[in-house]
Image (cartoon, grey):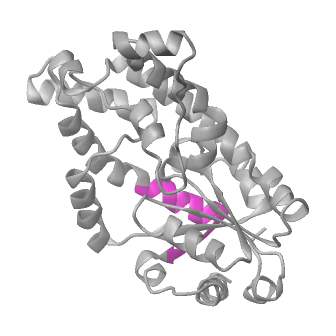
């Protein structure tokens, strides 16, 4: 249930979840709130990369190490160990495991393997999201935090059905947090694309979006699967995903929460600013 502005302002136990495209301020707000000392920061991507996909990630490291005779001998004799150093600020181990489809010579994965890892991530993301109530309780009972912020991944809209009033994941999240969409405008679209093009990162997509897009990409570029440039493909897919995700985010905000403009988020300097922005949005929402 969405609180009133007064209920939000007066509640000593604020629980919120941020969602939207990466680069619009989810982690910025979460870090700011955590730095105040009064908010517990739960990162969905961190939970995925440590709890639910940590073994996959490390096994992938080991598989590559075993290709090197020197490292293989040390690894098989337990002379060295390999671990993931994934942090809130560095999600590269997870991104590297997810990979990009295309030419193996250019670091790509066969499309079947890529989709297998996408499915693993889908399952892991739902599990991490469903852990939110547990972490709210844990944050209070174990660490003494009354306020809780969940920093969700940009792909949350890919693993839920925002038009289904019985969606179990969204029901769990909306029952335990105020869901807040950080909504980017047209001015943010090109900036996000430019940022992504400069440093393409693996993404998570629904198979119903990705597979038809993959087939269309092969046809339009007259290229075989094994010759696809992974970065070129992932750039094209990202641009298309920005458009495809927008109505899903919108439905999440309309049916399950509220939205705040990314331009307003960029001006936030303190937890008080964040609380005031949410309260003002709730006032307008009512």
Give the residue displayed 69% in from the left and 38% down from the top: 127
State whether residue 146 is above or below residue 244: below
Give the residue displayed 57% in from the left and 76% down from the top: 32
Whether residue 204 is visible: no
Percent coordinates x, y for residue 124 in the rendering: 62, 35
Percent coordinates x, y for residue 276 in the rendering: 63, 90
Camera-side residue of 75 and 282: 75
The span shown in magenta is: 246-260
Which residue is farthest front? 79
The picture quadrant where one finds residue 213 is top left
Which residue is farthest right? 141
In the picture, the quarter occupied by the N terminus is: bottom right
State whether residue 223 is above or below residue 187: above
Whether residue 132 is visible: yes
Which residue is farthest left? 222
Report whether 7 appears left or right of 67. Answer: right
Residue 105 is one of the magenta-drawn residues: no
How many numbered marks are there?
0
Percent coordinates x, y for residue 224 in the rendering: 15, 17
The picture quadrant where one finds residue 226 is top left
Camera-side residue of 37 and 117: 37
Report whether 58 appears left or right of 107. Answer: right
Residue 250 is one of the magenta-drawn residues: yes
Camera-side residue of 139 and 15: 139
State whether residue 81 is above or below residue 175: above
Q: Main secondary structure of the magenta part?
A: helix
Percent coordinates x, y for residue 156 in the rendering: 55, 49
């Amino acid at each position: 249930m969405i609180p009133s502005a007064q209920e939000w302002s007066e509640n000593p136990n604020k629980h919120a979840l941020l969602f939207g495209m990466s680069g619009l301020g989810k982690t910025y707000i979460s870090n700011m709130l955590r730095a105040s000392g009064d908010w517990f920061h739960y990162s969905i991507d961190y939970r995925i990369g440590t709890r639910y996909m940590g073994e996959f990630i490390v096994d992938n490291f080991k598989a590559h190490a075993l290709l090197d005779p020197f490292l293989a001998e040390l690894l098989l004799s337990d002379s060295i160990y390999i671990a993931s150093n994934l942090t809130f600020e560095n999600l590269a181990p997870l991104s590297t495991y997810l990979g990009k489809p295309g030419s193996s010579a250019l670091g790509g994965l066969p499309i079947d393997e890529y989709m297998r890892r996408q499915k693993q991530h889908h399952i892991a993301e739902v599990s991490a999201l469903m852990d939110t109530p547990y972490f709210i309780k844990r944050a209070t009972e174990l660490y003494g935090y009354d306020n809780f912020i969940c920093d969700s991944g940009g792909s949350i809209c890919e693993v839920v059905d925002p038009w289904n009033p019985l969606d179990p994941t969204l029901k769990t999240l909306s029952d335990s947090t105020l869901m807040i969409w950080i909504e980017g405008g047209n001015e943010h679209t090109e900036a996000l694309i430019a940022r992504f093009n400069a440093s393409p990162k693996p993404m998570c997509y629904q198979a119903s979006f990705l597979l038809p897009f993959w087939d269309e990409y092969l046809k339009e570029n007259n290229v075989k699967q094994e010759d696809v440039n992974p970065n070129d493909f992932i750039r094209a897919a990202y641009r298309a995903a920005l458009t495809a995700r927008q109505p899903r985010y919108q439905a999440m905000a309309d049916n399950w929460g509220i939205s705040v403009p990314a331009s307003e988020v960029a001006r936030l300097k303190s937890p008080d600013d964040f609380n005031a922005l949410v309260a003002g949005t709730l006032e307008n929402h009512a």
